[in-house]
Image (cartoon, grey):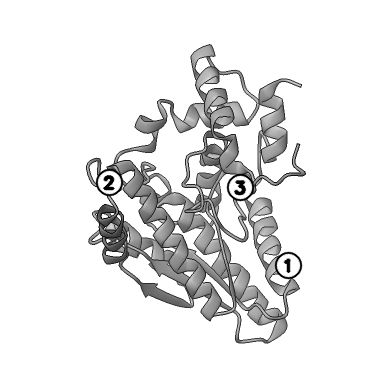
Amino acid sequence: MKLQKKIIKILGVKPKIIPKIEIKKCIDFLKKYLSHFSNLQSLVLGISGGQDSTLTGKLCQIAIQQLRNETKNINYQFIALRLPYGSQKDEKDCQDAIKFIYPDQCFVINIKNAVLSSERALKKSGIYISDYIKGNEKARERMKIQYSVAAVNNGLVVGTAHAAEIITGFFTKYGDGATDINPISRFNKRQGCALLKELNCPKHLYLKKPMADLEDNKPQQPDESVLGITYATIDSYLEGQQVDTRSKKIIEQLYLKTEHKRHLPIILSDK
């Protein structure tokens, strides 16, 4: 099997989707998994103001609302977290996303002091981290907080990784890549846009240029400039279309290079 077909099969990406149907599948998936555990009653998610967390957050809120209505259990809650590092330049987008999602609860927890404290502790031992590594520290600090909030509220941490990120390994290992459940992993970037459009999301949120915004020295750097390829091309690849030789090589090299990020910890019995 050619690598492209293998990747598409593993990630479960469809060449075409019907947004309304896929939205229902995502919501049912979240409801079924959460309600399977009698001791769990909340979904927890960090909201960044970008397309992926906006979509995932809206799906979570709808799922929780439906669970409350169906079970008459008012303890089911969706908890949104704003986790800025200092001040965030696109804070207005974050607030617009929160208004669109309308979560049951929303907490703002600034991660800057925690990240700087970690950096200082490393320096005391003679370990100096780069700006890039510090960016990963931010992602892991955010995930640490999400798990603490989930533990206090008997919840699950929800992930926002989609197929175009997963294929390229464009996420932080044990940062935004460490979650309990991920409802949008089988969609590429433009399919995520289509779902948000179906959900009547404000246009500027689903058309926003994707950016991880983790590095101090390169604020709001577009994802595509880091990847060296456009999401439109990655999306086409994931839909089974032919892409130019250079782009195909970049995508497949990224996939193979980051394979370790998509795998659970390796144990002796693994082959």
Seen from this angle, which residue lies furthest top? Answer: 245
Give the mark nearer the N terminus: 2 vs 3: 2
As rendered, which of 178 and 133 lies closer to the eye?
133
Callout 3: helix, strand or loop? Answer: loop
Instruction: Give the number of the disc on residue 53.
Output: none
**Measuring 66% from the left and 45% from the top, which residue is drawn there?**
266
Inspect this view and state whether residue 10 appears: yes
Instruction: Give the number of the disc on residue 32.
Output: 1
Do labels 1 and 2 touch, CB within 8 Å?
no
Q: At which x and y percent is residue 180?
A: 61, 61
As measured in the structure, the alpha-carbon distance from the residue carrying label 3 to the one carrying label 1 is: 17 Å
Q: Is residue 191 above or below residue 27?
A: above
**Measuring 55% from the left and 53% from the top, which residue is drawn there?**
198
Q: Is residue 160 above or below residue 263?
A: below
Identity, as a three-letter code, of the amino acid under mark 2: Tyr
Of tags 2 and 3, which is closer to the observer? Answer: 2
How would you rate the neighbour count of disc 2 (Cα within 10 Å): few for under 14, some for 14-19, many for 20 or more?
Answer: some
Residue 202 placement: quadrant: bottom left
Of tags 1 and 2, which is closer to the observer? Answer: 2
Q: Which residue is mark 3?
A: 185
Identity, as a three-letter code, of the amino acid under mark 3: Ser
Quarter holding the N terminus?
top right
Instruction: Classify residue 115 as left or right of residue 69.
Output: left
Q: At which x and y percent is residue 33?
A: 71, 66
Q: Which residue is mark 2?
A: 128
Q: At which x and y percent is residue 250?
A: 50, 22
Q: At which x and y percent is residue 58?
A: 52, 63
As rendered, which of 1 and 198 lies closer to the eye?
1
Identity, as a three-letter code, of the amino acid under mark 1: Lys
